[in-house]
Image: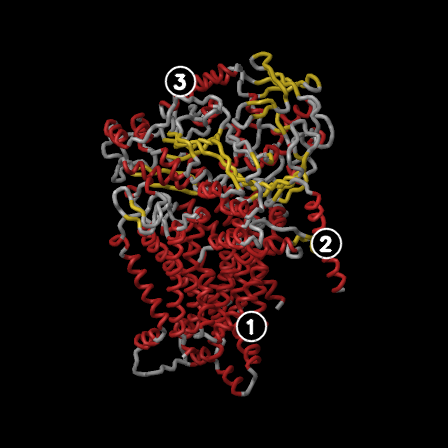
């Protein structure tokens, strides 16, 4: 199946060269790197710590972009309803949104992948049990999951990540199982069985690579979805603590000002979110194309 | 087969559309109002929630009424007098007709005062308003005597909350009979037409109403709970009036010359309860997270420092965008027992720091401020700003905001020690009884006194006020109790909310302190 | 085949039981509805009486046992907030939500598959690229934000469509539907579009990925080599190959659309089940929340069953034996 175009290239080199052939994807990758760097280095580069209430001044609230504070500080992107510098808030918020989106998706994907593969391979009562749990989970509204977690454990980044994992894993499990069932009937699996490989090895070495590509499509979408879901939970008052807003919470907070012309409170975080998600997806798409053995 | 079904369909469509056109051509005056909360039941004695009451008060009326400033005025009773300390006599208005044409009698009133007690499945019924009543006696068709269990001056206020239904229609009716319209027979300015749960309620004018004729033949009350959507529906002309205009939109709507905003101070006061009963309240620590030697909130100097550290006018201006009046009273301006001489504590961070140092906390301490994020105007933002301001004087504040459903249980149980609450009341003594009186299950005092503030002097004054059936004397006592409690900072008053309506520019409304939206009070200009 | 369906239904009964237990405990953990719904003027004794009358003072397991007994007799309890049987409330709201979700799915499929095919056939053209870029918008922008934007543009600015609410309904076999009246249709367009966006984007991407993959498969090459017309290649080979993931996702997403139309229904004041759910969650109206979730689980079970059955129809390689 794997037809390396050039036997001399190592898989990593092959990946890099395959990836860099698409200029748009490369640009997206660069943007993503800058965003990641900015997010990681946020505490070092931002003029204000937006999560430290003592640094905010309510008298500077809702200032338009470019306004100056009483102390001569310039708010390049304006301030929010609490007098938070939007630029600082966006960088800090990016950190949380990216972290929440990526971590929860990876964890949910991993969990769903294992569960789905096991269900497909095992069949019988185990498969039935797993799939019914999946059905249950899929029908459990994310709001209720988040509200119960909030009531039991309080607010926090870790709780949001847990809520998002709980909400998402079943989705992957079901998709993986569906694809894996198809793959398990293919000839190469029969061949592997004849060759005497163990069930686990077949599952993870042979079936997994074939299940993964369609999943990456879903996953890159899903990172974005996780971020948007976090925004929606924040919108419903079930997301991040109000004093440490994510991008989603910034958008949700600024949302009420959309009709009033104070566009910057919701618009700039929205743009930041959009750019991030577009970059993630362009990179993800390209990665899938390059990784997909059948598209060579 | 296929063909017949199709034509059947199109005929149904025609049947449905035709009445719409007829209405439009008849030129009937219609008012479309956007309500902000879900109407859950039409039974006026089932659940005491503002949206339900808004609807019910179009169809039903009460013995006593309140004017837009919450001052008591006659309702279905044209007058009442006190016979002795525990006996009241109400005289009904002459010739008041129910929607089915029958006359209102004292029998209907006596029945309606009993009915709340017979509703069993309700999680929040109206029994509380009639708990002081011992007996009701029908003297004649227009006269009703009410005997209270103890001298109780607030009876007329309480009776404002009990709507009068027709005994004939409601005798065996449950809430479902009201939802279907069968029992929706009241004396009010509007008759029930149709109820689509979760969506809208349609009303038609009751031409036999005793009051001055409302301007609208038809009224549609639509439920649009999402704030920006409600504004958008008004902007697009789908609604003529909306209640509870989001603070962010007020400026813009005011600029729009096709629309206008009308507002007044609401009876709802936003306040912060402080734990004043436990040695170590949860969430209150020194800056290293260690418990403090004693409860700082018990010290008046600390409470005053907190009050001084809060920049009320900045909150009113910036966070509430003008939808708040800085508060120093337990009730809003103009409400029974309000003391105009109490002035909101001015912002004084230096004074706050000095007081904290005097009280033995020169560097401040840590607290957790809890509150809802979906109940009051910009509640979550207010919490955040208070935290910001307190942190600045050394009281490092963490905010814990949650939906009301998750918050209120914790606050009532005492899991929080610094908690935001909003309260609306007709009278200072009533508000004191719930918020400030020393908690006492037997007397029903202090049900919402989360901080367990206890001051025998306030309790005594308040009890005296309740026992006064003379209104002037009662108000003086209530005002005194209010002043005492506020000077001692039983809780930290933040602001009184301002309630607003936005409407077509050719309409007029007298804004109501009790926040009710009444179609019959809207008049075309 | 029949055995398969029967066994699945048996398992589903167990699922329903587990679900009711989970939700019951979950709502219990959040708080007590009386705390929120109680008349603020009630005194301590009245509060205690109210709680006792509703049986909320009992330990959790007693409450659950009582619920279970009633539920087996077909009574899921009355809503606290409106005193109407919970199941009545839900069934009353169901047509509105189903109508919204089905319309959204229809929009997503009608636009998603052709656009996805186009993007898959011409992945490097500007058409393909802009379709893909557009699809990113669909799932990255939060629903509430897009919803309000749609209202602002199409209702407030352009005045083409109504802002909120459900239009005139007519009874179709006893079910009130709004898509048969002009007014109803106009009210349906914006919320359905809002709800469809996420699924639309997902379908575009899945179809594109599936198409690109299928085009590389040997059977497509053979077909082309054999001289099968391009239209037939598309129809017989490509479409068939991409239908499995598309059906799975569309099926799964239909479930989530119904279940999670919460935000769209709130923004557009659409009187559906999602709006009911969020209102009920806000006041911890447990009978409604539990009944709602039981109804949704049933829906999911049915949808999943149909999806699995469709699998076999579409792809003979998947045998039901494996998909118990």
Front residue of this view, candidates B522 and A288: B522
**How many neighbours does mark 3 have within 10 angstroms: few (below 14), some (14-19), or many (20 or more)?**
few
Chain letter of disc 2? B
The mark lying in front, picked from 1 and 3, is 3
Horizontal and vertical percent for residue C92? 63, 49
| Residue B360 in which image quadrant | top left
Asked if both marks, 1 and 2, belong to the same chain, the answer given is: no
The answer to whether marks 3 and 2 mark residues whose Cβ atoms lie closer than 8 Å is no
Compared with C166, B123 (above or below) is above
The answer to whether marks 1 and 2 mark residues whose Cβ atoms lie closer than 8 Å is no
The mark lying in front, picked from 3 and 2, is 2
According to the image, label 1 marks what residue? C319
Q: Secondary structure at mark 3?
A: helix
Front residue of this view, candidates C286 and A4: A4
Chain letter of disc 1? C
According to the image, label 3 marks what residue? B457
| Residue A17 in which image quadrant | bottom left
Q: Residue at x 70, y 37 (%)?
A: B182
Q: Secondary structure at mark 2?
A: helix
According to the image, label 2 marks what residue? B14
Horizontal and vertical percent for residue C149? 49, 54
| Residue B80 in which image quadrant | top right
**How many neighbours does mark 1 have within 10 angstroms: few (below 14), some (14-19), or many (20 or more)?**
some
Q: CA distance from mark 3 to mark 2?
A: 71 Å
Asked if both marks, 1 and 3, belong to the same chain, the answer given is: no
In the image, farthest residue toward the top: B84
Q: Residue at x 51, y 82 (%)?
A: C219
Horizontal arrangement in the rendering, residue A291 relative to residue B502 (left or right): left
Asked if both marks, 3 and 2, belong to the same chain, the answer given is: yes
């Amino acid at each position: 199946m794997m037809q390396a175009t050039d036997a001399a290239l190592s898989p990593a080199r092959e990946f890099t060269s395959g990836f860099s052939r698409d200029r748009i994807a490369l640009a997206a990758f660069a943007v993503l790197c800058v965003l990641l760097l900015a997010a990681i280095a946020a505490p070092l580069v931002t003029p204000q710590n937006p999560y430290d209430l003592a640094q905010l001044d309510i008298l500077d609230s809702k200032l338009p972009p470019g306004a100056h504070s009483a102390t001569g500080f310039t708010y390049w992107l304006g301030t929010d309803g609490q007098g938070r510098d939007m630029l600082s808030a966006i960088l800090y918020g990016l950190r949380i949104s990216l972290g929440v989106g990526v971590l929860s998706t990876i964890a949910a994907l991993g969990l769903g992948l294992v569960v789905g593969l096991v269900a497909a391979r095992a069949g019988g009562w185990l498969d039935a049990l797993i799939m019914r749990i999946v059905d249950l989970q899929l029908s459990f509204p994310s709001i209720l999951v988040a509200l119960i977690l909030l009531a039991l454990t309080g607010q926090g980044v870790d709780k949001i990540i847990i809520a998002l994992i709980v909400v998402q894993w079943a989705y992957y499990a079901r998709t993986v199982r569906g694809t894996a069932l198809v793959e398990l009937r293919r000839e190469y699996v029969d061949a592997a069985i004849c060759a005497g490989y163990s069930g686990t090895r077949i599952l993870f070495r042979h079936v997994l690579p074939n299940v993964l590509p369609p999943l990456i499509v879903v996953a890159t979408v899903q990172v974005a979805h996780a971020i948007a879901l976090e925004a929606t939970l924040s919108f419903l008052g079930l997301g991040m603590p109000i004093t440490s807003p994510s991008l989603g919470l910034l958008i949700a907070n600024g949302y009420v000002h959309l009709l009033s012309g104070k566009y910057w409170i919701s618009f700039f975080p929205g743009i930041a979110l959009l750019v991030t998600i577009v970059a993630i997806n362009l990179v993800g798409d390209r990665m899938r194309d390059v990784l997909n053995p059948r598209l060579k | 087969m296929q063909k017949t079904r199709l034509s059947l369909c199109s005929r149904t469509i025609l049947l449905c559309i035709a009445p719409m056109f007829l209405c439009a051509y008849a030129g009937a005056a219609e008012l479309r109002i956007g309500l902000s909360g879900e109407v859950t039941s039409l039974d006026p004695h089932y659940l005491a929630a503002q949206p339900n009451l808004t609807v019910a008060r179009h169809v039903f009326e009460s013995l006593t009424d309140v004017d837009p400033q919450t001052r008591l005025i006659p309702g279905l009773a044209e007058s009442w007098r006190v016979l002795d300390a525990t006996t009241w006599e109400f005289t009904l208005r002459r010739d008041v007709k129910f929607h089915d044409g029958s006359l209102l009698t004292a029998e209907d009133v006596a029945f309606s005062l009993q009915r709340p007690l017979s509703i069993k499945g309700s999680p929040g019924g109206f029994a509380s308003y009639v708990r002081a009543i011992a007996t009701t006696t029908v003297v004649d068709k227009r006269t009703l005597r009410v005997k209270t269990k103890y001298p109780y001056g607030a009876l007329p206020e309480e009776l404002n909350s009990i709507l009068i239904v027709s005994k004939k229609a409601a005798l065996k009716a449950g809430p479902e009979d009201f939802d279907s319209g069968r029992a929706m027979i009241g004396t009010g300015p509007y008759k029930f037409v149709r109820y689509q749960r979760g969506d809208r309620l349609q009303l038609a004018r009751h031409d036999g109403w005793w009051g001055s004729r409302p301007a609208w033949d038809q009224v549609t009350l639509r439920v649009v709970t999402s704030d920006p959507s409600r504004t958008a529906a008004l902007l697009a002309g789908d609604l003529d009036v909306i209640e509870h205009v989001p603070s962010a939109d007020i400026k813009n709507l005011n600029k729009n010359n096709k629309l206008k905003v009308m507002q007044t101070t609401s009876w709802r006061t936003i306040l912060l309860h402080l734990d004043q009963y436990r040695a170590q309240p949860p969430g209150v620590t020194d800056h290293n997270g260690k418990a403090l030697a004693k409860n700082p909130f018990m010290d008046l100097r600390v409470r005053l420092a907190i009050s001084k550290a809060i920049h009320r006018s900045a909150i009113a201006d910036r966070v509430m965008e003008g939808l708040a009046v800085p508060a120093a009273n337990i009730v809003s301006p103009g409400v029974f027992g309000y003391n105009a001489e109490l002035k909101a504590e001015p912002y004084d961070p230096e004074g706050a720091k000095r007081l904290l140092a005097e009280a033995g906390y020169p560097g401040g301490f840590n607290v957790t401020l809890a509150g809802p994020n979906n109940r009051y105007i910009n509640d979550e933002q207010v919490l955040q700003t208070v935290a910001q301001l307190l942190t600045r004087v050394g009281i490092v504040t963490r905010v814990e905001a949650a939906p009301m459903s998750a918050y209120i249980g914790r606050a009532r149980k005492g899991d929080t020690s610094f908690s935001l609450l909003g309260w609306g009341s007709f009278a200072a003594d009533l508000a004191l009884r719930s918020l400030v009186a020393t908690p006492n299950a037997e007397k029903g005092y202090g049900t919402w006194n989360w901080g367990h503030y206890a001051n025998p002097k306030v309790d005594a004054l308040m009890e005296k006020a309740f026992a006064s059936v003379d209104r002037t004397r009662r108000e003086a006592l209530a005002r005194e109790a209010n002043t005492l409690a506020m000077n001692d900072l039983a809780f930290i008053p933040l602001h009184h909310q301002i309630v607003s309506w936005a409407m077509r520019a050719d309409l007029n409304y007298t804004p109501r302190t009790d926040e009710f939206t009444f179609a019959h009070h809207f008049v075309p200009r | 085949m029949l055995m398969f369906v029967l066994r699945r239904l048996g398992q589903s009964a167990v699922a329903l039981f587990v679900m009711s237990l989970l939700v019951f405990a979950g709502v219990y953990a959040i708080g007590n509805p009386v705390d929120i719904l109680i008349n603020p003027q009630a005194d301590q004794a009245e509060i205690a009486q109210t709680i006792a009358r509703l049986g909320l003072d009992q330990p959790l397991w007693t409450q659950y046992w009582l619920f279970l007994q009633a539920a087996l007799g077909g009574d899921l309890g009355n809503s606290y907030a409106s005193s109407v049987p919970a199941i009545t409330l839900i069934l009353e709201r169901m047509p509105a939500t189903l109508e919204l979700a089905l319309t959204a799915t229809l929009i997503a499929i009608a636009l998603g598959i052709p656009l996805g095919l186009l993007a898959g056939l011409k992945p490097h053209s500007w058409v393909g690229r802009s379709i893909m870029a557009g699809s990113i918008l669909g799932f990255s922008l939060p629903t509430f934000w897009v919803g309000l934007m749609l209202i602002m543009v199409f209702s407030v600015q352009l005045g083409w469509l109504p802002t909120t609410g459900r239009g005139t309904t007519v009874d179709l076999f006893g079910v009130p539907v709004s898509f048969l009246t002009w007014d109803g249709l106009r009210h349906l367009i914006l919320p359905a579009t809002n709800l469809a966006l996420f699924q639309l984007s997902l379908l575009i991407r899945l179809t594109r990925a599936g198409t690109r993959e299928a085009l590389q498969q040997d059977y497509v090459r053979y077909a082309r080599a054999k001289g099968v017309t391009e239209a037939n290649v598309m129809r017989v080979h490509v479409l068939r190959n991409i239908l499995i993931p598309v059906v799975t996702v569309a099926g799964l997403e239909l479930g989530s659309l119904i279940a999670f139309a919460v935000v769209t229904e709130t923004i557009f004041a659409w009187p559906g089940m999602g709006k009911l759910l969020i209102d009920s969650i806000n006041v911890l109206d447990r009978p409604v929340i539990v009944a709602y979730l039981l109804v949704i689980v049933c829906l999911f079970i049915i949808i999943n069953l149909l999806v699995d059955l469709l699998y076999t129809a579409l792809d003979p390689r998947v045998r039901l034996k494996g998909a118990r």
